[in-house]
Amino acid sequence: MSERTERSERDLAARVVELVRRVAGPAAEAEVLVTRTDLALTRFANSFVHQNVAETGTAVQLRLHVDGRTAAGGGSRVDPDGLAALVERTRAAARLVPPDPAWPGLTAPAPVPAGAEVDEATAFASPDERAARVRAFVDAVEGLEAAGYCRTSYRSGAFANSAGHSAVGRAAEAAMDGIARAGGADGVARLCADRLADLDGAALGARAAAKARAAADPVELPPGRYEVVLEPAAVADLLQNLAWYGFNGKRHAERLAFAEPGTAQFDPAVTLVDDPLHASTLPFDLEGTPRRALSLVTAGTTGALAYDRRSGAEAGTGSTGHGMPGGSTFGPIPHNLRLLPAERVAGATGDGPAATVGAGVTGAVGDPDTAALVAGVRRGLLVSDFWYTRVLDPKQLVVTGLTRNGVWLVEDGVPVRAVRDFRFTESYPRALGPGRVLGLGRSPVRQPDRSDGSWWEAPAVRLSSWNFTGGASG
Amino acid sequence: MGFDAATAAVQAALDAGARYADARVMHRRYESMSARNGDVEELAQHESIGLGVRALVGSGWGFHAVPELSDAAARDAGRRAAAVATASARVPGPPIDLVPVDAAVASWASDCAVDPLGVPLSDKGDLLVGATATMREHGADLAEGLYQIWDTTKWFVSSEGHRIDQHIRECGGGISATSIGDGETQRRSYPSYRGQYGTTGWELVTSLDLAAHAARIAEESRELLTAPECPAGETDLILGGEQLALQIHESVGHAIELDRILGWEAAFAGTSWLDLARLGSLRYGSELMNVTIDPTIPGALGSFGFDDEGSPAVRRDAVREGRWVGVLAGRDSAAVAGLDYGGSVRADGWARLPMVRMTNVGLEPGPHTLDEIIAATDDGVLMDINRSWSIDDKRLNFQFGCEVGWEVRNGRRGRMLRNPTYTGIGPVFWRSMDMLSSETVAWGTPNCGKGQPGQVGHTGHPAAPARFRGVRVGVRA
């Protein structure tokens, strides 16, 4: 089934390129991405499955440059009439827009990596298999309320352009994200994996339940600056905002981003790699550019930014494989960021699976990796998760948001009691700046994004200061 | 063809054991154009058509979506939806009922004087290019303009006898100017953060007269770079209508979503501070606070003829004289809560499950004007146009940033202030509202995120400027 679909996507992409040639002439430049998606998600809340969805679809995206003008089109119709309409509509649009002198041209033929191996059992998992993991999670919370999801996805993509470049790839992914609720306190467990078999619903549920129980009866602490240990779920929010606003090549060219290549902007403990081939994802981008690992920060020094073809041409660097829908407006964004753990900083780029969740459950702390960081804290806070973070100032990447799913006061290396959620207002690069990272965990955990194919992998992190600006009372 | 495919899918789901099924065929054409610094930056057009079928087996829901409308594909989708629903029963919940609704056989279309997809691309491009060029000429480092158009036709069929088709046209746009200073950026937008949107034709965009405001917002964005910082402390706060629309959206609209109140969104979107046991008695805000749920407002972005469960658009109260009296509900959530109405369920496409969504949730106008509110304020800050928004998972603790603020001293608007923010707790904040303007605009929000897989909702928020006493402002990093 999988090979058949891959051939089908390749044939469709080639057919659209040929259609463009016929309609717009041999001088027209066209690039086509065809993606088949099988996405399924089982949601649970109040300890039962309340939503359960599955979707199959094929999307065609066409960008056309003809007579010096550029237009993009897309659609879900893959019958001959639908493809012809797409080409004609995009051709007609290109006639009416102004000239595009900065057109960067098409990706030249180049080898594309194979990408990670696809687990067929994950790609086409049944609703019963997802439900079984939900059942295990619900059973493991032992009477607490449980909520969350189990998701499986499969993508088969094919790219073709009129310069003769083509690429194919497949990817499957599984993710589970759940909370347990005890008396108004929530505990969370979240994991993204290449194989559904690597998701242990019982282990995730047990961890969420342990943290929820440890989060009961929180007290309110005054706002102010606290030393913190951020668990991987919270660190994922830092990575996401750094990726969107900091390492975005277009925003850098517009002087909207803080990142400055060649500058020691972070603590020497910080090494960040965008590493799409580390886990299952398509091995090429919207423009057909092969994906590869990109070192954004090495031992605290900003090294590179993400570019698509247009922003890369303007910067003189070329594309880094970050072409994406909407990228011409917002800019190219890394979506597979890894904060390398303590013992891997020297020269590591992408081997080894992310740690599984569940080992060493001890309550608030949750795992031995976090425990080692917490042990060094004289007085500070352990934070599980961040929520609803929004950028106040993009240049300094000042972000406001809230804690969620558990905060604990740590004294002399021990979480002594649960704390009510805080609001914070903090500059992310400043919080990770030189001298501010007091420790990194050794076990990274891959966190799923809201969309499959994007993920954020990080260990727990100990920071010298985090600016909490308000408590639950305002 | 839409009705045929939907009917086949529903029948197949019933044949496979569903006790209820509905199906939606949606055909959507989307167009957007963005311009930057006097050039068109991107023109994108997208067309999508497909079928989504929902089946109820026992107490379990299942949903399956396919991009094909052939009889075979539709029947297969119906069978698969029933199979997914059967799997849901492995982790069963309480029995599910659906509150009754008349099985409508109807057609509905939104008002549209000028078909937005019929306006020549060159005209639409000239509008954005001209406005962004003007902003550059007047000092903006980054001048941006955008419009978006959605043209959607739906065919809905249910096993209870619904057969409804709707044609909904939505569009809107706006401009913004960003100035870059030493280590910071300042932005001014018109008429709103992402523009103004409605369920209407291109006449909405024409009425905005983007070109007439381009020079002003560019100059204001530069002026903000040297304006004094918004002071930190507690003061009287006057909010412009656009910011108040977002305040309503975040701290009222989401809080009254019944699926959140029931805990169905607990892991992701969050829950709500509201307790159903206090529906009808809980004091949400001051007596000036009258909030309605009204999908019948002509031209507002949350308007429709029928929701995606076939319930007709009906106006309801959510907050009356400060008391919480109503929720946004679907047929299943209403039944669980013991309520007798749904009507607020929508999906953002054929491939997505319909879920509880805001329609037009808005604040009824008051007796004053903005000038009267300013004149009645001795010491405060006026803030307008949203810049950032964040609220906790129970919809209580919020912090908003606005693009611009002004001092208000002795009844007059004074100096411009930069980086204005305010923060508070929802019911405390709403109880502090003591003056409300009559100058209502139904602001459209085309980017409301909710659900897994994620969905983008279109909502409307009638709002007018208002004053709030003793609010904390000027929070900084």
Image: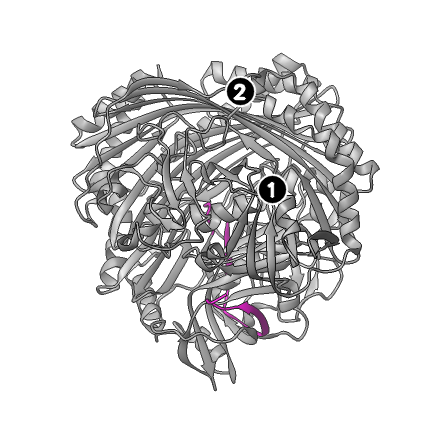
* Position in image of residue A174 (x %, y %): 39, 49
Disc 2 and disc 1: Cα gap in Å? 61 Å
Q: What amino acid type should be assigned to the residue bearing mark 2?
A: Arg
User: Chain ID for label 2?
Assistant: A
- Look at the image and say whether residue A131 sits in the magenta stretch: no
Q: Is residue A407 above or below residue B259?
A: below
Measuring 34% from the left and 53% from the top, which residue is drawn there?
A: A148
* Position in image of residue B196 (x %, y %): 59, 34
Quick one: A59 or B404, which is closer to the camera?
B404
Residue at the spot of label 1: B369
Q: Is residue B74 above or below residue A233?
A: above
Residue A333 in view of the camera? no
Q: Is residue A267 above or below residue A402?
A: below
Quick one: A142 or A215, which is closer to the camera?
A215
Q: Nearer the viewer, mark 2 or mark 1?
A: 1
* Position in image of residue A98 (x %, y %): 74, 23
Q: Is residue A473 left or right of residue A287?
A: left
Residue at the spot of label 2: A15
Quick one: B424 or B85, which is closer to the camera?
B424
Measuring 38% from the left and 72% from the top, which residue is drawn there?
A: A366
For the residue labelled by badge 1, is the local secondary structure a helix, a strand or a loop? loop
Residues in magenta, as a range: A449-474
Q: Do the residues at pointers 2 and 1 share their chain?
A: no
Q: What amino acid type should be assigned to the residue bearing mark 1?
A: Thr
